[in-house]
Amino acid sequence: MKFEAILFDCDGVLVDSEPIVNGVLRDMLEERGWAMSAQDCMDYFVGKAVRDERVAIEAHTGQPLTEGWMGLFYERRNAELRERLEIITGAHAAVDAAHTHTLARIACASGADRFKVEMQLTQVGLFGFFEGRVFSGHEMPRSKPSPDVYLAAAHHLNAAPSQCLVIEDTTIGITAGVAAGATVWAYCPTPARGPALLQAGAGRLFGSMADLPGLLA
C-alpha cells in the first residue's frame, strides 16, 4: 500500500528514552512517598504525560504537583537524556525509507513536550528529517490517546488521515492513531506485548525498526 504520509511517535519508536525518563520519574515520586518498581512505573506512565496524571500523583504522594516540581523533573530528565540517550536500532534507515516513500511527507507526533522531542531528535541525528514537522501533544487541546496530535500532523502535511500510516509502540498511542482514522503499525520488540497492541487497533506488528523499509517496499 502506498501511504500519503507517515507519522512517527518519538519515545520508544525513534529513541530509547522511556527507561531513562521513567527511571527519573520513579526516583522523584519515591522521594515524595510514592514507591513503585521500575516496571510498575513503566506500566503506569509510558505513553502518558506526567501532568495528565496529576490526580493520581497527588493522591499517592499527598502533595500538590507544582510547577516547581515539574521544572525539577524536566531538568533531571533532560540531564539524563543528554548523557544516556540512544537511537532505536534501525530507526535511521526506517525514517529514511519513510521519507523516500512519501516524498518527504513525514512528521514526528509525540505526546511529549516539544523541547524534549526536538532535543532527542537532534541528539540522535534525526532532526533534519523532521524539522518544521514536529508536533507535541502538550500544544494540543488533548494529548494521546485523543487523536489531536495526529490530526494536526496530517493536516500540516495536507494528507487525509485515512491515507496516513502511524508508527507507534504503546496502546495509548495506537488508540490515538486509530481514532485519527489512520492505519497504525506497531513496533513491538517484546512479543508478549503484541496481543495488547493488536487489541488496541494495530494493523501490523513488527519486531525491529530495521524491518520497516522492507514493509514499505
Image: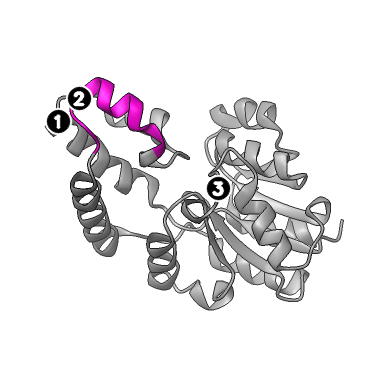
Q: Amino acid at mark 3?
A: Pro
Foreground residue, 2 or 5? 5
Picture disc at residue 61: 2
Q: Which of marks 3 and 2 precedes in the sequence?
A: 2
Task: Evaluate whether residue 94 shows in this view.
Answer: no
Residue drawn where x is 14% and y is 30% of the image: 32
Foreground residue, 142 or 175? 142
Task: Evaluate whether residue 127 shows in this view.
Answer: yes
Check disc 2: other Cα within 10 Å, few if <14, some if 14-19, many if 20+. Answer: some
Residue found at the far bottom of this picture: 128
Check disc 3: other Cα within 10 Å, few if <14, some if 14-19, many if 20+. Answer: few
**Residue 129, quarter of the rendered image:** bottom right
* Percent position of residue 124, x then y: 42, 69
Residue extent of the magenta highlight: 52-65
Badge 1 marks a residue whose secondary structure is loop
Picture disc at residue 141: 3
Q: Which residue is mark 1?
A: 32
Q: Amino acid at mark 1?
A: Arg
* Percent position of residue 119, x then y: 38, 67
Foreground residue, 207 or 145? 145
